[in-house]
Image (cartoon, rainbow, N blue to C red):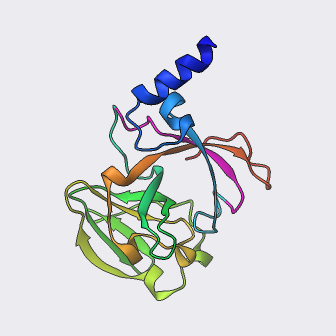
Amino acid sequence: MFAITAMISLYFINPYNIKSNNIRPRIIGMDIYRIPSKSMQPLLNPGDVIVISNKAYLETAINRNEIIVFNRKPNEKTGKVIPFIKRVVALPGDLLKIHKGFTYVNGKQISESYIKSANKIKQYSLNMTEIQIPKDKLFVLGDNRDNSNDSRMFGVISKSDVVGKATAIIYSANGKSGGEIK
């Protein structure tokens, strides 16, 4: 009985200040997420199950190259908030452009060894005019550039929409289970 009372108390206290009614992140600061699409291939595949640290950014800043889960505005038809998973490419104040398939942040080409060149053949994956990332915003991209709905389509995201950091793969049909997400 004590354990149930303690869990209910933690849920209402919400020690990690999580903007969710889900019990796992509110009590333990972590949640489980199933990858819905091919947008993060080859690292994450549809059906992979990963761990999200909802408390990762309570005391540390979001960094470039981290994989995050964030909420988008509610779907117009269903009213549901849709979680997305993408890689942070640019931070507030950064200048970002894509030229001939290469991504530049603050004038320097960034290393993107996680991307297969076969996933960068469509025009919107090859070129994007330079933009400056506004205060409290992030620019995110999927690793599978030709098959990703990301900041190139919907614009920058608010830091306040970040749900957490992807930290580990629990299950993957292709044998990557148990691995750290980088």
Q: Is residue 52 above or below residue 91?
A: above
Residue sitting at x 75%, y 51%: 172
Q: In this view, does 86 lie above or below 116?
A: above
Task: Residue 133: name its quadrant.
Answer: bottom left
Type of secondary structure dominating the magenta stretch: loop
Examine the structure image and report whether residue 50 is included in the region drawn in magenta. yes
Examine the structure image and report whether residue 94 is included in the region drawn in magenta. no
Q: For this view, does 106 lie left or right of residue 115?
A: left
Q: For this view, does 143 lie left or right of residue 138?
A: right
Q: In this view, does 107 lie above or below 11?
A: below
Residue sitting at x 80%, y 55%: 173
Question: Which of the pair 177/24 is nearer the observer?
Answer: 24
Question: Which of the pair 153/6 is nearer the observer?
Answer: 6
Q: For this view, does 71 lie left or right of residue 45?
A: left
Residue 86: tell me if it is visible. yes
Residue sitting at x 43%, y 66%: 74
| Residue range of the region highlighted in magenta in the rendering | 45-58
Task: Residue 44: name its quadrant.
Answer: bottom right
Q: Where residue 20 appears, x then y in whole percent?
A: 45, 44
